[in-house]
Image (cartoon, rainbow, N blue to C red):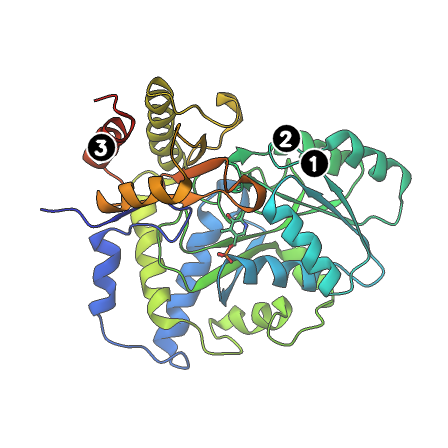
Amino acid sequence: MSRPTILLNPGPVTITDRVRNTFLQEDLCHREPDFAELILDIKKRLARVYEDSAEGYQAVLMTGSGTCAVEAMISSLVPKDGKLLVIANGVYGERIAEMAEVHGKNFVLVKAPWPEAMPLEEAERHLQNDPEISHVTAVHNETTTGRLNDMDALGELCVKYEKKLLLDAVSSFAGERIEFKKWNITALASTANKCIHGVPGLCFVLADEREMEKSHSAADSLYLDLFSYYEKQKTGFSPFTQATHVAVALQEALLELEDSGGWQMRMERYRSISVKLRDELDKMGIPRFLQENEYSSMLSSFHLPEGYSYEQLHDKLREAGFVIYAGQGGLFHQIFRIANMGDIRDEDVERLLRTFRQITGAA
Ligand SMILES: *Cc1c(COP(=O)(O)O)cnc(C)c1O
């Protein structure tokens, strides 16, 4: 069978036929009990993706892209009398600082240049000297470069200074190790259409139940109030219309994730592909942008090949049936990115490598 265009951007991903076929089912009304049951099932499966969160954490589903979940988390969970320490080393960390600004939060931003690691020493100085800080936020897999941030080190700081961690796990949930207890995670945000292999339209916050039960919402937005969704979704219903078709697909994607061995197997599969891509491209004179051991399992950044602009490279690959991803901001003229989430098969990887060999003249 011929293959569809393979998406090598960091979500939406190329979905499997199993997930695609759910769109052929009957339509659902979001106010009917069968839809509520579906939502309850998805909530349970999301919490169970990691053993650590199966007890004591509740998934809250919202209709929107990943940014929606991150913004609802920041807006609802950082109280007026609290203060947020934002740690950024890429576009997504800096976006959280913008959210804190927009929502009038008391916050402090520590940031590193995008190709660098999180500025943890500077972060610790703030944690030591600023007792007002109540929450810490960071990006697990910084999609800007593909860097997997050192959450073990940051988690240790959160435990040591007793700060609640709000984690952007949009591009890592279901594809990387996540330690809820060890990192002191109060909540994380993610989406249906990255490592879970669903389609775009639904996002979620996985939050500590105790926090949701005892705190009041700090949201200054009606639509992004996590607590109103949390309360209503105890029975599977939501305050507003949810993306019903997307929910059916998400349930199927979660079943597929379970059937294929869960996050560990997915991470291993991702890593075997990304390591191969980085090694093979390096041999063709397309070196990786970061050090090998800095990368997440499913996202790689590369220097642009000699003599190619991003657009030229993109168009060549698009012709061959692959969509790659540009660098953001100042990195546009320097790098390109390849994400290997989704239904990517060995034959796709081989064909991609053949295409690169042709492009670089290494064939
Ligand atoms: C994709 C992504 C987001 C959310 O982006 P959307 O376009 O809103 O889905 C947030 N953080 C990270 C790290 C991401 O990779």
Residue appearing at x 54%, y 49% in the figure: 55
Label annotation for residue 112: 1
Q: Position of residue 18 (x, y in %)?
A: 22, 54
- Tags 1 and 3 touching, CB below 8 Å: no
The residue where tag 2 is placed is 116
Select label 3 or label 2 by which is in front.
2
- Whether residues under marks 1 and 2 lie with C-beta atoms below 8 angstroms apart, the answer is yes
Residue 254 position within the rendered picture, expressed as x and y whole percent measured from the top left = 35, 52
Going 36% across and 37% down the picture, which residue do you hit? 266
The nearer-to-camera label among 1 and 3 is: 1
- Specify the amino acid type for callout 3: Asp
Q: Is mark 1 within 8 Å of ligand 1?
A: no
Secondary structure beneath dot 2 equals: loop
> Neighbour class for label 1 at 10 Å: few (<14), some, many (≥20)?
some
Question: Between marks 3 and 2, how big is the CA–CA gap?
Answer: 32 Å
* Residue 348, disc: none
Q: Amino acid at mark 1?
A: Ala
As drawn, which residue projects farthest toward the left?
Answer: 1
Residue indicated by mark 3:
346
Name which residue lies at 45% across and 48% down.
48
Query: In this view, which residue lies farthest toward the front?
Result: 307
Q: Is mark 2 within 8 Å of ligand 1?
A: no
Amino acid on which disc 2 is placed: Glu
Is 344 on the left-hand or right-hand side of 75? left
- Using the rendered view, name the quadrant where residue 88 is placed: top right
